Image (cartoon, rainbow, N blue to C red):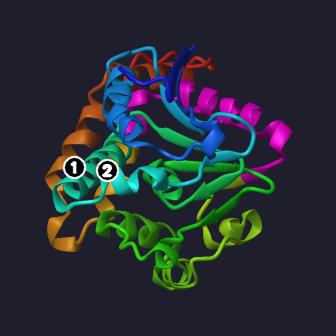
């Protein structure tokens, strides 16, 4: 579980909320925040009541406006500290991306740099109108991690990814939607309700099917020679032999809503 006040963890029904809580710096992520992410995700994953995980920023100005650059001199000022910091950020991104529960980035405001990296690690990205997006690495002399670059390319394609990196400019929610960088745009006052509706819809569906779809979609993003067909077949077979599949068939025949248990 998080050991820093800069990360807020809430369980609300079947939703796990991970909130980046540094609003005075537009939720810029400090080292302790990066380090807290894996334990937060692990806690959600260990709770059978949690069906979806939502990531958001505190306050009303930003999702996450990047890494906390004010810490770079102290925490990325020499080769050893750079490795420590980069390991923490990489582990945070990978833990979000590999979570078995569906993850949603609820973006309200700035989603910049490392903040966009966090959003890209999620399965879905819903944003409020007026939100802005960008990766300013070229303005800072930074090199963006290869894994994060791969996620961006997978989502928007190489041409848009190059435009985002080369220009280092801010992109509007309309541009982000057109690129496929985000799934949906809603009025600010409707954003949380729409996210909750999506979470409820996912929670009503068969957990094993949702998890299988997530893992197989992620598997298809690998290079052809790394695609694990046997692993995908095992996941599919597990669904067909599950109690939930039997319940789904029975509920359909009885014209009632299925009650899935994830087994």
Measured Cα–Cα span from mark 2 to mark 1: 8 Å
**Where in the figure is residue 20, as x and y percent of width and height?**
54, 35
> In the image, 15: left or right of 48?
right
* Mark carried by residue 222: none
Disc 2 on helix, strand or loop? helix
The number of numbered badges drawn on the structure is 2
**Where in the figure is residue 27, as x and y percent of width and height?**
58, 42
**Where in the figure is residue 184, as x and y percent of width and height?**
70, 53
Against 45, residue 211 (above or below) is below
Against 227, residue 70 (above or below) is above
Callout 2 touching callout 1 (CB < 8 Å): yes
Q: Residue at x 70, y 35 (%)?
A: 59
| Mark whose residue sits in front, 2 or 1 | 2
Which of 262/87 is in front?
87
* Quadrant of residue 99 within the rendered picture: top left
Please tell me how crowded label 1 is: few (under 14), some (14-19), or many (20+) other residues with Cα within 10 Å.
Answer: few
> In the image, 187: left or right of 10?
right
Residue 197 located within the stretch drawn in magenta: yes
> In the image, 168: left or right of 145?
right
Q: Quadrant of the C terminus?
A: top left
For the record, the magenta segment spans: 185-211
Residue 140 located within the stretch drawn in magenta: no
Q: Which residue is mark 2?
A: 75
Which of 249/108 is in front?
108
- Whether residue 216 can be seen here: no
Q: Residue at x 31, y 64 (%)?
A: 147
* Mark carried by residue 84: 1
Which of 85/119 is in front?
85
**Magenta portion: prevailing SS class:** helix
Please tell me how crowded label 2 is: few (under 14), some (14-19), or many (20+) other residues with Cα within 10 Å.
Answer: some
**Where in the figure is residue 98, as x and y percent of width and height?**
32, 44
> In the image, 117: left or right of 215?
right
């Amino acid at each position: 579980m998080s050991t820093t006040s800069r990360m807020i963890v809430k369980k609300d029904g079947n939703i796990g909320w991970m909130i980046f809580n540094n609003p005075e710096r537009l939720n810029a992520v400090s080292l302790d925040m990066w380090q807290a992410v894996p334990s937060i995700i692990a806690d959600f994953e260990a709770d059978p009541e949690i069906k979806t995980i939502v990531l958001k920023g505190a306050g009303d100005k930003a999702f996450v406006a990047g890494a906390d650059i004010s810490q770079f001199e102290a925490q990325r000022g020499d080769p050893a500290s750079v490795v420590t910091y980069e390991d923490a950020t990489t582990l945070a991104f990978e833990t979000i991306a590999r979570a078995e529960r569906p993850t949603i980035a609820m973006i309200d405001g700035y989603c910049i740099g490392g903040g966009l990296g966090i959003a890209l690690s999620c399965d879905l990205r819903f944003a409020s109108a007026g939100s802005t997006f960008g990766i300013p690495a070229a303005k800072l002399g930074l090199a963006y991690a290869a894994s994060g670059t791969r996620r961006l390319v997978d989502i928007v394609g190489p041409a848009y990814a190059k435009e985002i990196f080369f220009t280092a400019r801010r992109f509007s929610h309309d541009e982000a939607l057109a690129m496929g960088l985000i799934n949906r745009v809603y009025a600010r006052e409707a954003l949380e309700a729409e996210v909750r509706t999506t979470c409820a819809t996912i929670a009503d569906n068969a957990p094993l099917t949702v998890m299988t779809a997530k893992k197989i979609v992620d598997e298809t993003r690998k290079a052809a020679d790394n695609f694990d067909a046997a692993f995908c077949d095992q996941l599919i077979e597990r669904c067909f032999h599950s109690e939930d599949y039997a319940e789904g068939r029975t509920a359909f025949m009885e014209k009632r809503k299925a009650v899935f248990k994830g087994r």
